[in-house]
Image (cartoon, rainbow, N blue to C red):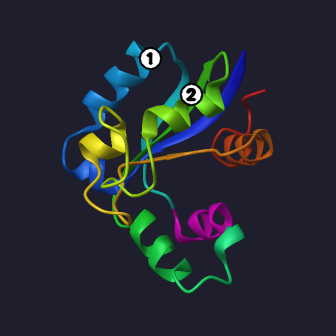
Amino acid sequence: MERTFAIIKPDAVAAGHSGDIIRLIELNGFSILRLEKRMISKAEAETFYGVHKERPFFGELVEYMTSGPVIVMALERENAIASWRELMGATDPKKASLGSLRRMFGTHIGSNATHGSDAPETAAFELGLFFPDLH
C-alpha cells in the first residue's frame, strides 16, 4: 500500500464540489486515512510551494491557496500516487481527460480543483507538513 497527499483546492470547496470529489476518491478505491477542512496559512503555503519560490507565479499561488478553506487528505491504496494523479487529470482542465476531476470541476489552469503529490518524496514531505503524526 502507498500513501499520497491530496488537496481539494479553494475554488472547488467554494463551488460546493467537495462531496462529489470525496465520493469519486472512494469509488476509485482510495482509503481516506485523514481528512481536514481548514485554512492554509501564508507560511504553510510558502513552505508547501517552496519548490516554486523563484517562479513568477509563486505569490499568486500562495495568495490563491490561502484565499479560502481547503480540504487536505491523506489517501492510501496500491499505487496511490500515480492513481491519484490519473484521477485528477492534467493540470490544465481543458487538457484533462474526460472523467478526470480537473476536467469535471476545474475552471482553468490556475483554479484546477485538486492537488496531488507527484512522487514518493513529495508525498512524504506534504503528508509530514499537514499530518505530522501520521506514520
Q: Quadrant of the N terminus?
A: top right
Q: Which amino acid does label 2 sit on?
A: Ser
Q: Identify the residue under disc 1.
A: 28
Residues packed near mark 1 inside 10 Å, few (<14), some (14 to 19) or many (20 plus): few
Looking at this view, name the residue that lies furthest to the left: 15
Circle nearer the N terminus (1, 2):
1
x and y percent of residue 109 in the render?
Answer: 37, 63
Q: Do labels 1 and 2 touch, CB within 8 Å?
A: yes
- Residue 116: name its quadrant: top right
The 10 Å Cα crowd at callout 2, few under 14, some 14 to 19, many 20 or more, is: some
Q: Which residue is pictured at 39% across the width and 58% down the height?
A: 92
Q: In this view, does 35 lie to the left or right of 23?
A: right
For label 2, the SS is helix
Task: Report whether residue 73 is seen.
Answer: no
Q: Which amino acid does label 1 sit on?
A: Asn
Residue 105 is covered by the magenta coloring = no
Report which quarter residue 67 is drawn in.
Answer: bottom left
Magenta stretch: dominant SS?
Answer: helix
Which type of secondary structure does the marked residue at label 1 adopt?
A: loop
Quadrant holding the C terminus: top right
Rendered view: 1 above or below 21: above
Location of mark 2 (residue): 83
Q: Where is residue 24? Give x, y as percent.
A: 35, 23
Query: What segment carries the magenta color?
Result: 41-49
Q: Residue at coordinates 24% horizontally, 39% vertically from top-left?
A: 17
Does residue 60 appear left or right of residue 47 in this picture?
left
Is residue 111 placed above or below 54 in the rendered structure?
Answer: above
Say which residue appears at 61% left-offset and 63% top-offset. 44
- The number of numbered badges drawn on the structure is 2
Q: 86 left or right of 125?
A: left
